[in-house]
């Protein structure tokens, strides 16, 4: 797809972006001494050896690909690797609707043609991206009456897929149809046709380009969960109805600060069992800067595990990285303070993580058969009525430790890329025995550590203190949606039960409908755990006659912890415009900052912020 989970969310907008700050380029250079399987000695750049990534993948019956974009095609140093290392390329933006049909019925294919011409000149296939997506739509599409949307969609598909007929290996026909909780994402297409728009789009694409493979593509579906369940049910139903669908794309935009997707290989396999191909379509693994050995080791581990998951499923046809170099990565421009997500650095030099991928694809020569040292100093650092927190001393390895597996009573209960872990969901007043083992990128594991016993407490305790931070996810103050980014922070000494917490964001409803719809487009805690509703505030304060209230269904927030980002969005039922400039809670900051005009309530009592 592209790069965005939320329709109008630039913070998740997956276009490939040019340029890195000097600080980021410096950080990329510091990366080179990474500890990963097959890495060169400290301070030494790692040269990509023959065979290429695509040749290694082809030996396993797969392809290995990269996304690209038109501005990059003028960079001859960049295109030298793009044209030789990969068997397929995906245009990041040049085949999207706003580029190919900016005015109704007036098509422009010059940018897409340039990408296709480059691929043909280098013997590469092209993945078409994307025909129907809620984002990067020209304004005229959203302005259409519902009765005209299907015809416009089918005309667009016929025009674009017809233009490229026979030159596209596979199309991302429908991009990102689901919210994180598994509900269908609202868009001009869903609003006009319901979920049937997906079948209509696939049928139109097949009619226009019958030789191309047709895919649905989405993010946060890489592992088992509500969103991947929704995708599975959709694909199953489409197959049963005889709708032409050949595959499902799993974007795999990962981050080392979040867990690896749950049972990724098993998830890919269940889709393959429906009789469709699967593909990893937009892989990158970002981190919060600055980089350190732990983050880099986790990144290597994530890349290895994705590669092995694809190789473990016979119908996984290949892997696409979302541009191969940090120089043109979309991450720094989208996730503030994050980056270094790619296999090559900003100077177009291969990073040690590249050798990890090559080894996972079957390259020989790493020769690492030495297990890491056994973790020492395993200690209980904290307990609650439902959790035990652990820490230990880092292991050493001849190449580099990539992480640790944690066991409770002999059963693995989690993994960590650092030297600490909290096991939650335990029973109160109960003793548990824990051990830890280390692992490296080559798959070697240490013996388990000496055990340690931790006992949960009798009660949950208190001491929690909350604040909310905000960032503006939409610079347009006069459009038809409001899109705050929020995160909850516990500054106290004890955990807080999230089910007791509500957050209120005050705004002015202006003219138009008094009925609202609200959505979560992305949340670290999972959109399925959030509730959103809009109510009249009864306040006479300017810019505060309504509020968005956000609640949590379950869970707790540990002392010193943050909920992580929650990307929220709401609109009036008639989609009329707001005038946000004077809204009580709105700010213009695009990085998270404390928000004293957004309220946090615990059991109905205001504990943070000033209500209007």
Image: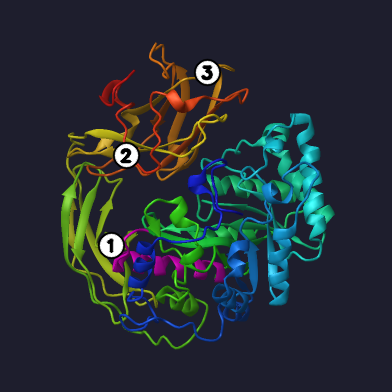
The image position of residue 99, as x and y in percent, is: 69, 50
- At label 1, counting other C-alpha atoms closer than 10 Å, the crowd grade (few under 14, some 14-19, many 20 or more) is some
User: Which mark, residue 593?
Assistant: 2
Q: Judging from the image, what secondary structure is the residue with disc 3 in?
A: loop
168 or 318: nearer the eye?
Answer: 168
Q: Earlier in the sequence, mark 3 or mark 2?
A: 3
Rendered-image quadrant of the C terminus: top left
Residue at x-position 32% and y-position 67%:
403
CA gap between label 3 and label 2 equals: 27 Å
Is residue 262 in sight in this rendering? no
Q: Is residue 142 above or below residue 95?
A: above
CA gap between label 1 and label 2 equals: 27 Å
Residue at x-position 44% and y-position 70%:
345
Taking 338 as reference, is 167 left or right?
right
The image position of residue 110, as x and y in percent, is: 73, 59
User: Which mark, residue 302?
Assistant: none
Q: Earlier in the sequence, mark 3 or mark 1?
A: 1
Q: Look at mark 3 in the image and give the residue it sits on.
A: 510
Rendered-image quadrant of the N terminus: bottom right
Q: Earlier in the sequence, mark 1 or mark 2?
A: 1
- At label 2, counting other C-alpha atoms closer than 10 Å, the crowd grade (few under 14, some 14-19, many 20 or more) is some
Q: Look at mark 1 in the image and give the residue it sits on.
A: 418
Q: Is residue 232 above or below residue 598?
A: below
Residue extent of the magenta highlight: 288-311
Residue at x-position 55% and y-position 58%:
16
Instruction: Give the overall secondary structure of the magenta segment.
Output: helix
267 or 87: nearer the eye?
Answer: 87
Residue at x-position 50% and y-position 57%:
330
560 or 323: nearer the eye?
Answer: 323
């Amino acid at each position: 797809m592209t790069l965005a989970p939320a329709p109008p969310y630039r913070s998740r907008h997956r276009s490939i972006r040019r340029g890195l700050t000097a600080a980021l380029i410096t950080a990329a250079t510091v990366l080179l001494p990474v500890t990963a399987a097959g890495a060169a000695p400290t301070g030494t750049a790692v040269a990509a050896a023959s065979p290429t990534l695509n040749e290694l993948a082809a030996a396993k019956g797969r392809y290995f690909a990269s996304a690209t974009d038109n501005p990059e095609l003028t960079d001859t140093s960049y295109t030298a690797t793009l044209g030789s290392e990969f068997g397929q390329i995906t245009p990041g933006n040049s085949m999207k609707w706003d580029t190919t049909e900016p005015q109704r019925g007036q098509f422009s294919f010059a940018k897409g043609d340039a990408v296709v011409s480059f691929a043909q000149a280098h013997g590469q296939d092209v993945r078409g991206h994307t025909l129907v997506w809620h984002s990067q739509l020209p304004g005229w599409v959203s302005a259409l009456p519902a009765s005209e949307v299907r015809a416009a969609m089918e005309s667009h598909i016929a025009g674009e897929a017809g233009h490229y007929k026979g030159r596209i290996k596979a199309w991302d026909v429908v991009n990102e149809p689901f919210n994180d909780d598994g509900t269908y994402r609202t868009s001009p297409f869903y609003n006009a046709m319901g979920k049937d728009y997906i079948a209509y789009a696939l049928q139109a694409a097949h009619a226009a380009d019958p030789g191309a493979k047709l895919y649905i593509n989405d993010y946060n579906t890489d592992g088992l969960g509500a969103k991947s369940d929704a995708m599975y049910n959709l694909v199953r139903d489409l197959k049963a109805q005889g709708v032409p669908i050949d595959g499902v794309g799993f974007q795999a935009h990962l981050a080392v600060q979040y867990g690896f997707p749950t049972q990724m290989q098993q998830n890919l396999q269940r889709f393959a069992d429906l009789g469709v191909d699967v593909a990893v379509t937009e892989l990158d693994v970002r981190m919060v800067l600055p980089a350190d050995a732990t983050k880099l080791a986790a990144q290597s581990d994530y890349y290895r595990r994705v590669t092995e998951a694809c190789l473990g499923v016979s119908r996984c046809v290949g892997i696409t990285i979302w541009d191969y170099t940090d120089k043109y990565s979309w991450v720094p421009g989208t996730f503030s303070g994050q980056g270094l997500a790619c296999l090559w650095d900003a100077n177009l030099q291969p990073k040690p993580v590249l050798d990890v991928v090559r080894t996972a694809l079957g390259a020989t020569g790493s020769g690492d058969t030495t297990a890491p040292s056994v973790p020492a100093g395993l200690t209980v650092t904290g307990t609650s009525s439902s959790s035990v927190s652990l820490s230990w001393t880092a292991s050493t390895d001849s190449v580099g430790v990539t992480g640790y597996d944690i066991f409770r009573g002999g059963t693995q209960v989690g993994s960590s890329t650092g030297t600490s872990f909290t096991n939650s969901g335990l029973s109160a007043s109960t003793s548990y025995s824990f051990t830890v083992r280390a692992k490296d990128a080559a798959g070697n594991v240490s013996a388990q550590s000496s055990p340690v016993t931790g006992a949960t407490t009798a009660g949950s305790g208190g001491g929690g203190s909350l604040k909310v931070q905000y960032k503006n996810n939409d610079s347009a103050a006069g459009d038809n949606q409001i899109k705050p980014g929020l995160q909850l922070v516990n500054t106290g000494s004890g955990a807080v039960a999230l089910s007791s917490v509500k957050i209120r964001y005050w705004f002015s409803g202006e003219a138009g409908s008094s009925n609202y719809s609200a959505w979560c487009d992305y949340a670290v805690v999972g959109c399925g755990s959030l509730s959103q509703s809009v109510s009249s505030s009864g306040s006479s304060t300017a810019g505060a006659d309504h509020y968005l209230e956000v609640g949590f269904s379950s869970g707790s927030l540990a002392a010193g912890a943050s909920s992580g980002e929650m990307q929220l969005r709401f609109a009036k039922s008639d989609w009329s415009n707001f005038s946000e400039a004077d809204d009580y809670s709105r700010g213009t900051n695009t990085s998270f900052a404390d928000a004293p005009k957004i309220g946090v309530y615990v059991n109905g009592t205001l504990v943070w912020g000033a209500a209007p």
